[in-house]
Image: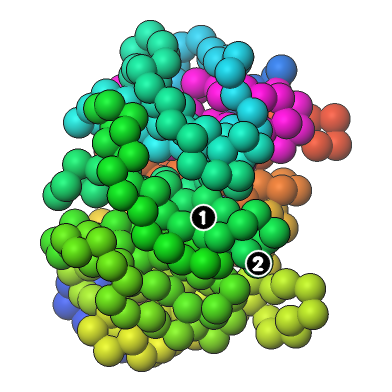
Amino acid sequence: MRALVLFAFAASIATPGFAAAATPALELAGKIPVPHMVGTWDHMTVDPKTDRLFLSAQDQQSVYVVPLQGGAIRRLSGGFDRPQGELFVPSFDRLVITNGRDGVVRILSGRGYRTAATVRVSVGADMIAFDPRHRLLYVESGGTDSNRGPGWLALIDPATGRRVGRIATAYRAAALVMARRRPLLYAAIPGLDQVAVVNTDTRRIVRRLSVPGRPASMALDEAHGRLFVATRTFAGDPRPPTFNVLDTATGRVIASLPSKDATEDMYLDAAQGLIYTTSLQGFVQAYRQLNTDHYALVATEPTGPHSGTSQFVPGLDELCVAVPPHSGQPAAVWVFRPI
């Protein structure tokens, strides 16, 4: 077992309510092999009631079901056309899967995995967020910057599969984060170096937050009014990748730290005061929240090539990283835990 050792950084400026980085914080607790998977992973989600992971094997046209508490791994296939985004919605007991090639959103039952509804949005259907306040899905697709037509967010009723609205974004959205305390959705728009803020009551973009680079992944600390945004490089854009902390009230960037490139997923572990990122370069990184305005990069650990897909499971306090097959090793889910 190999530990990710996190050293103390600037502990003297830590404030009450925020843990100081005084001890090792993460360990690689185990690996769950997925021996028959080939190609690359895209996204994953979790059912918090049963601790089942769902992973999109986009090149295999399949979705894998991996029980974190033990049990047989199951492969779902048939009817997928490059499955990409995934989201499990516990209140509806539904698994939602977007298909990038045909633009179809499939809504499956959470137990038998039968198709409950389908709805077509547009090519490039990918990221998904659920609005518990209005009990609606937000699904992004399209994007003039990716040659997929106009970018937009589709509002879908997960009970019926009916599309009930749309919000134009023009450019594609690379990440979606839903607030819980306020009716707000944050949508990263890399083509504009912005995060668009959607009011989910009015279904309109009400603000645009500038980011020093092309935003690729996000996490939200709603309790302290902080939005975490990782940027990535693109062809012809020399700006280095960064991890940024924005004040959600003012939009001001209050901290900017180095980051591995091609960050795909990001999560706040509020209990530990850590923000985790995973990148396609094959690294887990951890940032320590010293206080609301001060942060430190405290860990960078290799996983495997193209291992940007991850899922934080708060109930188990585990960060699960999907590692595709490489160097003769089968695909696996690597499980990290704080210590």
The residue nearer to you, when weighing 48 against 316, is 48
Q: In the image, is residue 297 above or below residue 94?
A: below
Callout 2 secondary element: helix
Callout 1 secondary element: strand
**Magenta residue span:** 37-66
Per the picture, the main secondary structure of the magenta-coloured stretch is strand
Q: Is residue 54 magenta?
A: yes
> Closer to the observer: label 1 or label 2?
2
The residue where tag 2 is placed is 145
Q: In the image, is residue 267 above or below residue 259?
A: above
- In the rendered image, the quadrant that contains the N terminus is top right
The residues tagged by marks 1 and 2 sit, at their Cα atoms, a distance apart of 21 Å
> What residue appears at the point 24 percent right and 72 percent down from the top-left corner?
18
Q: Residue furthest right?
A: 327
The residue nearer to you, when weighing 41 against 317, is 41
Q: In the image, is residue 306 above or below residue 184?
A: above
> What residue appears at the point 72 percent right and 72 percent down from the top-left corner?
234
Q: Amino acid at mark 2?
A: Asp
Q: In the image, is residue 120 above or below residue 170?
A: above
Q: Is residue 267 magenta?
A: no
